[in-house]
Image (cartoon, rainbow, N blue to C red):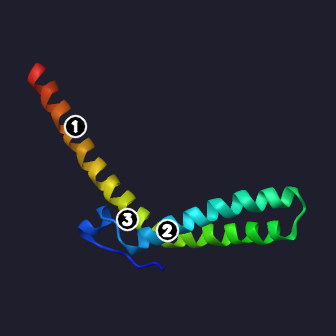
Amino acid sequence: MSKTTSGNSQKEWNHVDLIACIMSAVSYFCILAGMTLLLLNQWTGYALTALALISAVVMFLIIDPKLRKVSSDYEKKQKGYLEELDRIIEWQKTEET
């Protein structure tokens, strides 16, 4: 599940993103129905809540590597932008003096 993708595919949707979206919907439904049934003291509430927790963990394991890659790419771009901004500010300061 820790498969990493490279390059431009980070910006495109693929089957992994579809699976994560489906797991998200399953998790939200199960937590809603499970907690409702738990409040009514139904045994199915425990099962649905457990299923919600399992699907949330699976969703996290599927999508986390892609999110980490996108985040690191963003941090690299941001660092470059900040360095360029510092150069512009230094250039303007030396021009004014």
Residue 85 visible within the image? yes
Q: Is residue 91 above or below residue 83?
A: above
Q: Nearer the viewer, residue 56 or 40?
A: 40
Q: Nearer the viewer, residue 89 or 11?
A: 11
Q: Earlier in the sequence, mark 2 or mark 1?
A: 2
Question: In terms of sequence position, does the residue under pointer 2 or pointer 3 come before the other?
Answer: 2
Q: Which mark is residue 27?
A: none
Label 2 is placed on what type of residue? Ala
Identify residue type, mark 1.
Leu
Where is residue 53? Give x, y as percent. 68, 68
**How many neighbours does mark 1 have within 10 angstroms: few (below 14), some (14-19), or many (20 or more)?**
few
Q: Whole-percent x and y of residue 97?
A: 12, 19
Category of crowding for the residue at label 3, using alpha-carbon neighbours closer than 10 angstroms: few (below 14), some (14–19), many (at least 20): some
Residue at point 71% right, 57% down? 32
Image quadrant where residue 46 sits: bottom right
Q: Which residue is mark 2?
A: 20
The answer to whether the residue labelled 2 contacts the one labelled 1, judged by CB atoms less than 8 Å apart, is no
Q: Residue furthest left?
A: 95
Residue 23 as seen in the image, left or right of residue 97: right
| Residue 97 seen | no
Q: Secondary structure at mark 2?
A: helix
Left or right of 94 on screen, residue 55: right
- Residue at label 3? 69
Cα–Cα gap, marks 2 and 1: 37 Å
What is the CA distance from the residue labelled 2 to the residue labelled 3?
A: 16 Å
| CA separation in Å, label 1 and label 3 | 24 Å
Q: Residue at x 41, y 79 (%)?
A: 3
Q: Residue at position x 86%, y 70% from top? A: 43
Disc 3 marks which amino acid?
Lys
In the displayed orientation, state which residue is furthest to the top. 97
Residue mark closest to the camera, 1 vs 3: 3
Label 3 secondary element: helix
